[in-house]
Image (spheres, helix red, strand yellow):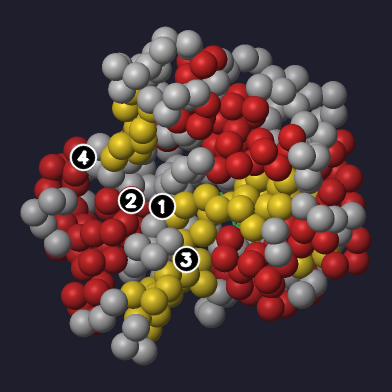
């Protein structure tokens, strides 16, 4: 029966998806992160939860090809501007769907939390587009993907490296028709902290929230602007230095999942076919084409990944670059960030203190 420490369990849900008699539920802890809870009475001790856990079965991973790095973006400006980086996710998803396939990624649910969801129509790509900086709930999406793959349908899965690892170990065998995309991941934030942040803003604006956009590009890709639309028509904009949720995430490392501070899914070779990221510090041959609308770092990890990327043809700008040039600006590809000094304090206070007040207190202590 699965029994991982909180520092190790990533919450990928592979155990919950694989359990043959539904004896494992994913339950939120006091920080708001999902962990497996086994019903010992109905558990048949079959051991499938342990053999499908990507953390317990983390073997050395081999690749026949060396990773290749590209600077790239969608040539459709609407797609590029509404995406987090260069919009390459949307172009890959469109291509898979036009071949009769399905795409699984994170959408916002009615409570504004992220959850994985499968789409089969080009019109629905916008639901999955955009980074949601809160941990996504996998639900039973791994089981649904397996059903599609077993029917022979092409499927593209996008998720954090540990979610990709979870899907692979849940499936237990490679599928030619599965395109696996991960992203360079700083870490997954607590759904509870995120909801507290939204509650604080709802109070300030006297309105429910309509939609959250992280890294909105109204002032340029580099600004990391958070945009929130409220039901009463108000709009909130704040860059990474002013927005308190981004500050707690990027500066204070306050509310990431415990396993993210010692992530075992970093580095190379990667399990995914394609890794998507922001190409910070990019140097293009023709500097005039860099317009701060967002540049994706696309890392090709397999021949399958290369084939899918090449199929995008003239819908994208692409220029081969070097991984060595990209990684110094994106250390999260290879190493975890340190645990925030005030993380414990944050979670001890969050149930009784307003989010903004709490982060402001933490901000004061740094002076
Ligand atoms: C939590 C998180 C941390 C990240 N950290 C870094 C980083 O340190 N460095 C870096 O360069 N890039 C990071 N990224 C990736 C980056 O923000 C872009 O998502 C990526 O470059 C793809 O951009 P795009 O323009 O091609 O597509 P986009 O349209 O932005 O597509 C984003 C894709 O990611 C999926 N997704 C969104 N939110 C989540 C989530 N919470 N969990 C799982 N899947 C999700 C969406 O379904 C979609 O498929 C992170 C993303 C997330 C979600």
Specify few, some or many for label 2: CA neighbours under 10 Å numbering under 14, 14-19, or 20 or more. many
Above or below, 143 against 367 in this view is above
Which is more foreground, mark 2 or mark 3?
2
Above or below, 46 against 96 in this view is above
Task: Identify residue for label 4.
Answer: 30
Q: Earlier in the sequence, mark 1 or mark 3?
A: 1
Q: Earlier in the sequence, mark 2 or mark 3?
A: 2
Whole-number angstrom distance, CA of label 2 to CA of label 3: 15 Å
Whole-number angstrom distance, CA of label 4 to CA of label 2: 11 Å
User: Which mark, residue 191?
Assistant: 2
| Left or right: residue 217 compared with residue 361 | right
User: Which mark, residue 134?
Assistant: 1
Q: Is mark 3 within 8 Å of ligand 1?
A: yes
Question: Residue drawn at (77%, 31%), measured in percent from left and top?
Answer: 175
The reply to whether discs 1 and 3 touch (Cβ–Cβ < 8 Å) is no
Specify few, some or many for label 4: CA neighbours under 10 Å numbering under 14, 14-19, or 20 or more. few
Which is more foreground, mark 1 or mark 3?
1
């Amino acid at each position: 029966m699965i029994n991982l420490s909180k520092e190790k369990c990533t919450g990928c849900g592979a155990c919950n998806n694989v359990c043959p008699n539904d004896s494992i539920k994913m339950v939120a802890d006091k920080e708001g992160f999902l962990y497996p809870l086994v019903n010992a009475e109905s558990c048949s001790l079959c051991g499938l939860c342990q053999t499908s856990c990507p953390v317990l079965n983390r073997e050395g991973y081999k690749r026949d090809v060396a990773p290749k790095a590209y600077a790239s973006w969608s040539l459709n400006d609407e797609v590029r501007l509404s995406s987090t980086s260069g919009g390459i996710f949307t172009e890959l998803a469109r291509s898979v769907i036009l071949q009769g396939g399905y795409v699984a990624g994170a959408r916002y649910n009615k409570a504004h939390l992220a959850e994985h969801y499968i789409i089969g129509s080009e019109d629905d790509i916008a639901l999955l587009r955009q980074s949601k900086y809160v941990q996504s709930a996998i639900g039973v999406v791994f089981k649904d993907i397996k059903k599609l793959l077993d029917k022979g349908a092409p499927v593209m899965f996008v998720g954090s490296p540990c979610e990709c690892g979870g899907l692979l170990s849940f499936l237990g065998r490679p599928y030619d028709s599965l395109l696996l995309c991960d992203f360079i991941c700083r870490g997954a934030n607590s759904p509870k902290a995120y909801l507290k942040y939204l509650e604080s803003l709802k109070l300030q604006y006297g309105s429910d929230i309509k939609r959250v956009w992280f890294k909105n590009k109204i002032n340029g890709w580099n600004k990391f602007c958070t945009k929130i639309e409220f039901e009463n028509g108000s709009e909130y904009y704040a860059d990474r230095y002013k927005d308190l949720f981004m500050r707690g995430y990027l500066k204070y490392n306050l509310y990431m999942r415990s396993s993210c501070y010692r992530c075992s899914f970093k580095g190379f070779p990667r399990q995914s076919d394609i890794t998507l990221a922001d190409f910070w510090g990019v140097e293009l041959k023709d500097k005039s084409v860099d317009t701060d609308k967002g540049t994706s770092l696309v890392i090709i990890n397999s021949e399958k990944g290369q084939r899918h990327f090449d199929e995008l043809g003239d819908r994208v700008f692409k220029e081969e670059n070097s991984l060595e040039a990209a990684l110094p600006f994106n250390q999260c590809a290879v190493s975890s960030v340190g645990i925030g000094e005030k993380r414990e304090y944050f979670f001890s206070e969050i149930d009784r203190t307003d989010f903004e007040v709490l982060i402001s207190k933490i901000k004061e202590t740094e002076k």
